[in-house]
Image (cartoon, rainbow, N blue to C red):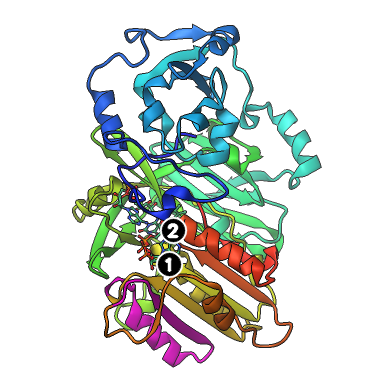
Amino acid sequence: MLNVPSQSFPAPSSQQRAASGGRSKVPLKQGRSLMDWIRLTKSGKDLTGLKGRLIEVTEEELKRHNTKDDCWICIRGFVYNVSPYMEYHPGGEDELMRAAGSDGTDLFDQVHRWVNYESMLKECLVGRMAIKPTIPKGMLPKTQVTDTLTKEGPGSPSYDWFQTDSLVTLVIYTKQKDINLDSVIVDHQDDSFRAETIIKDYSYIIHIGLSHEIQEDFSVRVIENVGKIEIVLKKKENTSWKRLGHPLENHNSLIPKKDTGLNYRKCQLISKECVTHDTKLFCLMLPPSTHLQVPIGQHVYLKLTITGTEIVKPYTPVSDFLLSELKEPVLNNKYIYFLIKIYAAGLFTPELDHLQIGDFVSVSNPEGNFKISQFQELEDLFLLAAGTGFTPMVKILNYALTNIPSLRKVKLMFFNKTEDDIIWRSQLEKLAFKDKRFQVEFVLSAPTSEWNGKQGHISPGLLSEFLKRSLDRSKVLICICGPTPFTEQGIRLLQDLNFSKDEIHSFTA
Ligand code: FAD
Ligand code: NAP
């Protein structure tokens, strides 16, 4: 539903506007970009028809507002008049009308729960539901949550704490074996301490208002074979704590990950370097009071306030392993790198590009459905990337070449418009020279006459030649990422070539 609209992204003639299958975008009329919407919301115009009054909305009242000219939608207990937004919705009016006069929370979450509708639709807020239509699962009383989980999810984790004169150690018992440092995200802001442990599709949350002050930095240790996490906090004063603190929202609860909401922290821009004519490597530093590692194949959301409205876009962190010959290796996990293409006509990327070193950007918890277990016993890894669709491939490549003993070969087919658009070309060529298991092929859709490599778009011919298994029955994984129609077409071609669903991983929002 409430997708982040864009002025002309993809460009009006682009195939991206007519993605077949899945969620399709529709062309927006002139003057209906996100920027135009932001301007309208700032114009002082009464968008609800209620002259700024907030009302309590009954279910009957909500149901009555079900036409395009008078359309109310409830999201998480708040009711919005979305009629003025209709023409700005990139998913189209019909898509928005699916939730007309009803609770659209589930529909919204299915499509893009990350979109910051509170900020985008704040001028359309009509009020709250008089009676909450549904209670989100995360808000269920603890006993009910646990009951549900024992049937569907992991067994209940628990926590404990102990102290010495100078330290407080919080111990989380996950009762799972596949827990590692990526599984836990810890933030300490003011006196609020929050640790979210990802256990399969659930989050176990410790959220406490600490009883005493602690120092900024802390350490996190995982004892993998027993699934135990130890977070060691440094006391500011060497006094004995009688209690850890008071519980805050969702404390000591295990809730489906999709219901946890995106948690943000402010990260500082440390450096910004040109990689191609339009793509830059951004390095952000996490605050000392955060522990966060983005798992392979996952993305985060970056948030900036643009003319008073919070705008959120997804980006996939890369590692700097391809640059390691040029740079000092980074010894701590405080830095997150992003390769980001700046679109002159874009809403978010020019704003990001204008940030100065030392400025802040909010970074969310990671999301994504790539699983390291997909690498188990893997022999052949094929990577199909177009443009910045290369970003998830960076960490995958690094991990595969260093951690999969069964691996025989990794091949990257990298689609770009021109030679100037190829990200980290010489680094990739060097890697192929150094590690004989790795091969890279560049395919250009708009090459100059000097180009004597492969040309064109993703096609059956290119793929059947490229996707040769090293052995007849070798275990294969194909990862694909790029503009949505590229990815969708690629998946269709791979299925035509008889690769199974389990052998294909596509990266999407
Ligand atoms: P928009 O306002 O959305 O676009 C407006 C203008 O930008 C258009 O006029 C058009 O000219 C131009 N434009 C935008 N995209 C394209 C395109 N593909 N082709 C042609 N023209 C275009 N991007 C990265 O650079 N690095 C990443 O690591 C990355 N990771 C992502 C991860 C996920 C899961 C997803 C779904 C997307 C990712 N993206 C990444 C894309 C990113 O989220 C934004 O869509 C992109 O940065 C454009 O944002 P914008 O607001 O600047 O442009
Ligand atoms: P781009 O430069 O516009 O395109 C890269 C290559 O893909 C070009 O050769 C282009 O050919 C080709 N291409 C574009 N549309 C195609 C289609 N419909 N069928 C076949 N080939 C097509 O790409 P970009 O601007 O870097 O954009 C990268 C995309 O990747 C963005 O849409 C971004 O959202 C997405 N992305 C997704 C993730 C993720 O989901 N995890 C991560 C990173 C990036 P033409 O010359 O014909 O355009």
Q: How many marks?
A: 2
444 is within the stretch colored magenta: yes
Q: 201 and 480: which one is in front?
A: 480
Quadrant of residue 269 in the image? bottom left
Residue at 35% in and 52% down: 13
135 is within the stretch colored magenta: no
Ligand 2 within 8 angstroms of badge 2 C-beta: yes
Q: Residue furthest right?
A: 151
Residue named by callout 1: 386
Examine the rendered structure and indicate whether residue 220 appears above or below residue 500.
Answer: above
User: How far is the residue under mark 2 from the one under mark 1?
Assistant: 7 Å
Question: Residue 483: which numbered mark, if any?
Answer: 2
Residues under numbered marks 2 and 1 in contact, where contact means CB atoms less than 8 Å apart = yes
Q: Amino acid at mark 2?
A: Pro
Residue at 31% in and 77% down: 328
Examine the rendered structure and indicate whether residue 335 appears above or below residue 162.
Answer: below
Where disc 1 sits, the SS reads strand
Q: Residues within 10 Å of mark 1 (few under 14, many from 20)?
A: many
Q: Position of residue 329 (x, y in %)?
A: 36, 76
